[in-house]
Amino acid sequence: MHLAFDPAAHSGLFSLSEEESRHCIKVLRMNSGDAFRITNGKGLIFDATIIDAHPKHLQAELAEGVKGYDHWPFKLSIGIAPTKNSNRLEWFLEKATEMGVDEIYLFESFHSERRKIKLERLQKVMIAAMKQSVKSRLPKLYDVKKLSALFHLPFDGDRFIAWIDDGVRLTLVKAATPSQNTFVLIGPEGDFSRAEIEESKVAGFVPVSLGASRLRTETAGVAAVHTIQLINQM
C-alpha cells in the first residue's frame, strides 16, 4: 500500500500537498474510495481513504494515527563528512534512513573535499527512503558544520570517532552499549587528521575501528548505523 508523507498530517479530513496529490492521482492513478497511508515523519502512520481525487489538492479521511514500528529505546546520531561525489552521500542517506537513524550531522574537516551541499535535494532522498521502507520517522538532517562544533554538541550517551589507525584496536561492535544513546563520527575520504583525533578525545569521543577492511566514507557510515541497530536487536 502506498505511503505518502506530510508533516502536518492529522486524523479527520486532510488535504495533501500538491506534490503528493499529483503523485497519487497522476502517477499511481488512484481514485475516490482508494485506500493508502500517510506518515507525518514524526512517528505516526495514518490509514487514509480518498474523498476527493483532485490532482493538486487531494482530500482524504484519515483515521487515528498509530505508532510506526521504527521506534527504539535509544538515540542514534551520525556525523559524516560529505563525499566528493554527491551521489555517494545520497546513497548513504538513503541506506541510513532505511536501516534507522535519528539524526545526521554533516561536517567539514581538515581533509574534506566537499564543503557545500544541496540540503533540499538530500532531504528529498531521505523522504523517498522513508516512504519506500515504510518508516514513520524522518531522520533530522543538519547542514554542514565545522567538525569542532560537533565535538561540543550536548549529547547524553556514548560518543565514538571511527579512525583508521594501527593503534586503534577497539571495535565499534564491542565498544557500543545496547539501549544507550550513541553518536558516531565518520571522516572524509582522507580520514581525520591526528590533531582532530586528539581534539575529539579531549571532547570525550573514543576512537574505534569499524573492522579490518578499509571502507569508503559512505560505506563506513552505513556500517556504523547497521552495527548499532544490530547490537540493539540481538
Image (cartoon, rainbow, N blue to C red):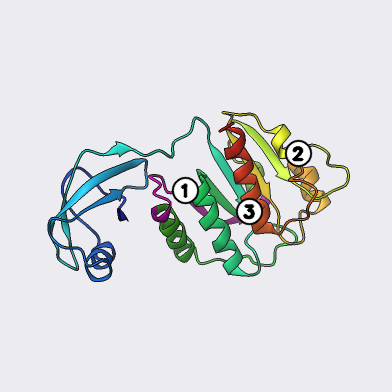
Q: Quadrant of residue 131?
A: bottom left
The x and y percentages for residue 17 are 25, 61
The x and y percentages for residue 1 are 30, 53
In screen coordinates, is 141 left or right of 38? right
State the CA–CA distance, disc 2 to disc 1: 25 Å
The x and y percentages for residue 100 are 51, 45
State the CA–CA distance, disc 3 to disc 1: 14 Å
**Which kind of residue does numbered mark 1 sit on?**
Pro
Q: Residue under circle 3?
A: 80
Q: Quadrant of residue 33?
A: bottom left
Identify the image quadrant of the C terminus. Answer: top right
Considering the numbered disc 1 on the image, is that residue within a helix, a strand or a loop?
A: loop
Residue at 17% in and 61% down: 58
Residue at 57% in and 39% down: 229
- Between 130 and 75, the one lying in front of the other is 130
- Between 81 and 172, the one lying in front of the other is 172
Residue stretch in magenta: 131-147
Q: Is residue 11 above or below residue 126?
A: above
Q: Residue under circle 1?
A: 139
- Residue 171 got which mark? 2
The x and y percentages for residue 98 are 49, 50
**Which kind of residue does numbered mark 2 sit on?**
Thr
Considering the numbered disc 2 on the image, is that residue within a helix, a strand or a loop?
A: loop
